[in-house]
Image (cartoon, rainbow, N blue to C red):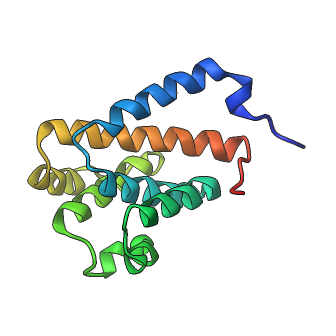
Amino acid sequence: MERIDFYTASPKAVKAWVALEQYIATSSIDKPLAELVRLRSSQINGCAYCVDMHATDAREGGEAERRLHALSVWRETRFFTPRERAALGWTETMTRLAQQPDTGESYAALAEQFSAEEMVDLTLLISTINGWNRLAVGFAKMPE
């Protein structure tokens, strides 16, 4: 069955979501880190459209191919800084809420690397990409 295009089906809803993205773009989280977070969350959620988009955006922003290839196994590499590792750990914890992860360890790592404002901004970013993933997966949006 063909799925609807959520952009045209509810433009006011998408406009509100885009406004949230506009805040995130000016938030305390830098763009290279934001793209890694978006990409990792999209990998976990199995969102082909978002994985394609954010890998492309990260690459265009100067991200190294080696790091992009290793993102799904970031814990096993030395390619990521302590700050990036804290953000990726928090991303995985927040993205996998349905599995009831223990938030203590990833929160502690996050608090060592990020200010309170950055922690909230990062969590908002993670929440937003998870929402986009659900729209894209649910309505079968495919990369072109």
In the figure, 63 relative to 92: above or below?
A: below
The picture places residue 86, in percent across and down from the top left corner, at: 22, 59
Q: Is residue 17 left or right of residue 75?
A: right
Q: Quadrant of residue 73?
A: bottom left
Q: Quadrant of residue 4?
A: top right
Image quadrant in which the N terminus is located: top right
Extreme residue toward the right, this view = 1
Extreme residue toward the top, this view = 12
| Residue shown at 21% from the left, 51% from the top | 104
The picture places residue 77, in percent across and down from the top left corner, at: 30, 81
Q: Toward the viewer: 60 or 18? A: 60
In the figure, 139 relative to 95: above or below?
A: above
Q: Is residue 66 left or right of residue 7?
A: left
In the figure, 50 relative to 43: above or below?
A: above
Numbered label tally:
0
Q: Is residue 58 left or right of residue 76?
A: right
| Residue shown at 74% from the left, 47% from the top | 140
Q: Toward the viewer: 97 or 79? A: 79
Image quadrant in which the C terminus is located: bottom right
In the figure, 135 relative to 41: above or below?
A: above
| Residue shown at 20% from the left, 57% from the top | 105
Q: Quadrant of residue 68?
A: bottom left
The picture places residue 112, in percent across and down from the top left corner, at: 9, 54
